[in-house]
Amino acid sequence: MSNKIIVGSEEWCALPGLGIKAIKARVDSGAKTSSIHAINISTSKREDGTWVSYEVHPLQGGRKVALQCESKLIDRRVIKSSNGETEKRYVVREQLQLGEQSWEIELTLTNRANMGYRMLLGREAMGSKILVDPSTTCCLGEMSDDEAKELYGHIEVPRSGLKIGLLASNPNLYSNQRIIEAGQQRGHEMYFLNVKQCYMKLDASQPEVHYRDGRILNDLDAVIPRIRPSMTFYGCALTRHFESLGVMALNTSEAITRSRDKLFSLQLLQKNNLDIPTSGFANSPADTTDLIDMVGGAPLIVKLLEGTQGKGVVLAETRKAAESVINAFKSLKANLLVQEFIKEAQGKDLRCFVIDGKIVASIERTAAPGEFRANIHQGGTASLVQISPEERKLAIKAAKTMGLEVAGVDIIRSSKGPLLLEINSSPGLEGIETATGIDVASAMIDSIEKRLGWKKETA
């Protein structure tokens, strides 16, 4: 027992073979395998086997320290996380340094950006070498974040890049934080701009956009509109004003307005011969019976035109229920759509993330038990999926039809083939980045760089 290392519930450790001088690990004897935060994962064949390349950000809460790592691939396994989700991960073997001792451990590669720690140390890696005292932390030595950064050297992000504004409402959302981080990492000046705190000056000779502190924002190179549905009118007006000043918008005001109108977007998709679920729209209670019949009867979906993230969407399982829901919505003078229910989809749909006419990532979303909406915000789960050429073509054409440079295209698999459900102009990043390990935020910044012809200066 005297030879065993006593550790707390979290410890600083190192992985010398990867150039990781300090990383704080969560010590968890309840977890079998160990894992490390890795994104942009790719494999290559060599004479001695398959190697995996990946990017590691060892310090929590930031991406300024970015290490390009590679390891020999030893396995690929299905891992079940603590919340019950399964994921197929690459497995590598590296030297762990903990205190004054070191030994080889196996690590699985996964996106841990939304976890509390960039590394998890499981019981297989502990073996007979460690005793865990869960009542303590950092038994082998505490280290501040600044001290950890010192080990990697002072990494100052150059400020010779673009000035990019993120138009949104909540700076703490995962997606917004990731976009800001990705832009900063590439050397750009990133500004979070609360849509409600922006003011427009309309003047033929000197139009301007002001922020809450009186700052004039006319010198921005680009804006990324991520406008919540309740702010669509003002947010699109603001984006349109930036466009009139010559500021590039990643998704134009016109495209966002078009995609936010569910009825108009379905009409556009239909006009361009893109397959959608049979849908109906009406404004009079007298039309209820025929409206139900035209989509094939119950069960059916009733949607508020202004809903988002699965809100304002109801499954009516019987004709009587459908009549009640439709008439209730109409009594509130709400615009609504009815849509055929695709039973064979079994609560699953596909989310394809399209940037500049290319699919950069795809996931399959599965509804929570007892739920029919697969939205992550409604408790749905995400997993990797291989989409078909037909689905790929459908998603790309849908984004192009809406005029969106960045879009989350939702597709459902039916007995008639893939059908378009919805095109989202402000798709969330958390579910798709976590499931795929793909750096979608950086792909969005890359789109801005290409469209503005910006290239990073090299020494």
Image (spheres, rainbow, N blue to C red):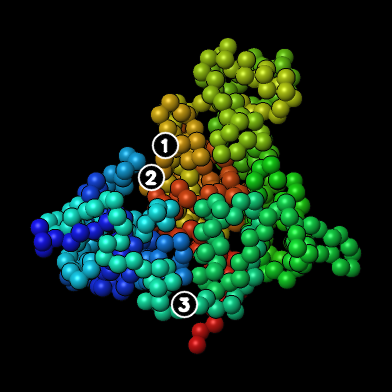
Residue at left offset 20%, top offset 59%: 6
Cβ atoms under marks 3 and 1 closer than 8 Å: no
Residue at left offset 34%, top offset 66%: 142
Q: Residue furthest top?
A: 320
Closer to the eye: label 3 or 1: 3
Residue 324's tag is none
Residue 155's tag is 3
Choose the circle earlier in sequence order: 2 or 1.
1
195 up-or-down from 47: above or below = above
Q: Residue furthest right?
A: 204
Residue at left offset 43%, top offset 53%: 114
Q: Could you give the CA–CA distance between mark 3 and mark 1, rounded to whole angstroms? A: 41 Å
Question: Label 2 sits on what residue type?
Answer: Ser
305 up-or-down from 317: above or below = below
Q: Quadrant of residue 325?
A: top right
Q: Could you give the CA–CA distance between mark 2 and mark 1, rounded to whole angstroms? A: 8 Å
Choose the circle earlier in sequence order: 2 or 3.
3
Closer to the eye: label 2 or 3: 3
Cβ atoms under marks 2 and 1 closer than 8 Å: yes
Q: Quadrant of residue 151?
A: bottom left
**Label 1 sits on residue:** 366
Mark 1 neighbour class, 10 Å CA radius: few under 14, some 14 to 19, many 20 or more: many
Q: Could you give the CA–CA distance between mark 2 and mark 3, rounded to whole angstroms? A: 34 Å
Residue at left offset 46%, top offset 36%: 379
Mark 3 neighbour class, 10 Å CA radius: few under 14, some 14 to 19, many 20 or more: few
**Label 2 sits on residue:** 383
Give residue 247's position: percent from left, percent from top: 71, 66
